[in-house]
Image (cartoon, grey):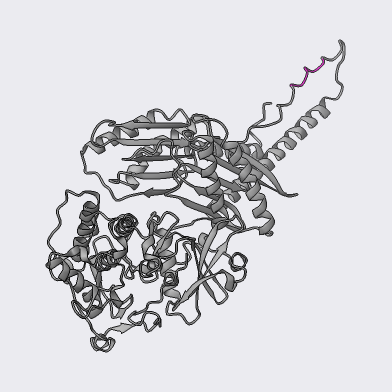
Amino acid sequence: MLISTKTPNTLLFLSSLQIISIGLSVGATVPTYLYHNCTNATTYTPNSIYQNNLRNLLSSLSSNASSEFHNTTAGEGSSSPVYGSFLCRGDVNTTACRDCVTFAVKDVVKRCPVQKETMIWYDECQLRYSNRSFFGTVYERPRVSLLNTANVTNPNQFNLIVNTTTKGAAAEAAKGVPGDKKFGTKEANVNGFQRLYTLAQCTPDLNASSCGRCLTDAIGRLPICCSGKLGGRVLFPSCSVRYEVYPFYYQNSSTPPPAASPPATPPPPGFTSSTKGKSKTSARTIVAIVVSIAVAVLLFILGFCFLTKRAKKKYTLAKGGDDITTPESLQFDLATIEAATNKFSADYKLGEGGFGEVYKGTLPNGQEIAVKRLSKDSGQGTQEFKNEVVVLAKLQHRNLVRLLGFCLEREEKLLVYEFVPNKSLDYFLFDTERQGELTWAIRYKIIGGIARGILYLHEDSQRRIIHRDLKASNILLDADMNSKISDFGMARMFDVDQTRENTNRIVGTYGYMPPEYAMHGQFSLKSDVYSFGVLILEIICGKKNSNFYQSDYAEDLLSYAWKLWKDGNPLKLLDPTLKDSYLENEVVRCINIGLLCVQEDPEDRPTMKTLALVFNSDSVSLAVPKQPAFYNRSDADMKSMGLKFDESRSAEHPYSINEASISEFYPR
């Protein structure tokens, strides 16, 4: 139909269409950025072999962007191979996929300029590369959750529909063998006015079982991040799930297009119209009606786009930031926690200490949790609580306990952690009946795990973090006896170039604190190194430093270990329950490391970077330790120096300053 462009309505309609088409054509070239993670701090140098291989890899990914998914390797067989892949959302067309990947290969090196391992997500695609092969393996870290902050009116019913529908999409996505497209969508009616749209996708190099497992774990995080929210998504490197109340993916029409109308029958011969004027009026009426409808449709489209854009802007990342409002997607409703713990029933209680109590709980999806309930008069106030939430929300490492969420409602302050079944290290280490369960192989693995966790805090996380309360009760053990550092209520964040800080408020546990901190309030990365050294010696001998006493030889564990080392009898430090199940060179090497870590001068203590090299290679030589730091000051002596102490004490541990960390109660 030819429409005259002289009418104002038509001009408006055509102009608007032109503006929309221009906007769409421009927007299609720039994908919607979601999140990125420079996974580790292992870096490459400019003009290195790795950088050259990375350039080749990114070029290969870009040139293969006509497909939905591509795995490739550059520099295979060289000393610095690079493994990479991209995955486009299953419903986007080839052009959108190519635009996204082309943009990503340039954008990712700007966001992670020298890191060897990165992950970046956009709405249309994701891109990943690493110095380690990850093909065909499920990876759920790093991960990110996003949500629409708008609430639904009936969260319980809505959550149930979300769970059922996302599982249906996941089942669809998981079908097939590796190489098949692993993408599925499902829709469901929420009510008479609203529909739910869900999407699930895996990388095609996974088999059906691995894809299903990955998506199950992703769906399991939706109640944690997005319960009762209008939209949400969970992104893993290997899979992702998303739900919305608007169609956010391209839908294939299930109804065939209408059949073409038959040609109009010509009028019989000799027929003439005697209503010329009426025909002219009818034509104008038709044009006016069509234009009015077109304008109405246009306004509807513009309104829909505006609301959709607004809804997308409401998305909040479930991580990051230095304010308690930033990780709001981690927040649980008090009702959910009360249901999980049977209203904090005594039967669910795992233990208690100076800051409150810890309960075991089970979420509606079956996930077991540990809930740290801070007492109203606890030494850990709102600031420490916020500190722990913000710090833990940013940390992702297998040797750190995982924070699932928190609750600040009414008078309650709650932290929700993953449930770690084997409780804490001191539960085994300092109990004469349980010490035997810790073989030397397990103890050595625990020491290595603690070292990796501290290294991550000091060097590999987004901000340098000083834990300041490393001790045996803050080392949790999972089902495989892997160590997980917990309790970050006393942690402090440093800038990249910051080395130390002073305080007049001493927090931590006596026996694990280095002398420069206990006496002068100075703490640094080397403070955690000192605590790690004490932990190593405790793990080797099976005795607690603050309770250790041998009047005939030494007054404390550090002096005892030092004298044995100096006299050439280091193996006498070894826990007798280990008998002959140990490797002598490993034990001696660990004692050497422990003594180096507890040197009086912080400059004489090794960094965690150095210790990582030591644990990874027997060929790295160790320095000869000097006499370690010994001190036995009373609280009055320390307070006379102008230092202030948290008075929260535990009757079970009379030497402890602020021995109130929740993991003291053997919580998980």
Residue 154 appears in which quarter of the rendering? bottom right
262 magenta-colored: yes
Residue 579: x and y in percent read 29, 60
* Region of the chain picked out in magenta, as a range: 260-265
355 versus 244 height, above or below: below
Of residues 78 and 210, the one drawn nearer to the viewer in this rendering: 210
Q: Is residue 86 left or right of residue 155?
A: left
Of residues 125 and 275, the one drawn nearer to the viewer in this rendering: 125
587 versus 541 height, above or below: above
The reply to whether residue 558 is in sight is yes
Principal SS element in the magenta part?
loop
Instruction: Determine the residue positioned at 58% across, 59% down.
Output: 363
Q: Residue furthest top?
A: 269
570 magenta-colored: no
Residue 99: x and y in percent read 44, 34
Q: Is residue 48 left or right of residue 9?
A: left
Instruction: Determine the residue positioned at 27% across, 31% down.
Output: 75
Q: Is residue 578 left or right of residue 379?
A: left
Q: Quadrant of the N terminus?
A: top right
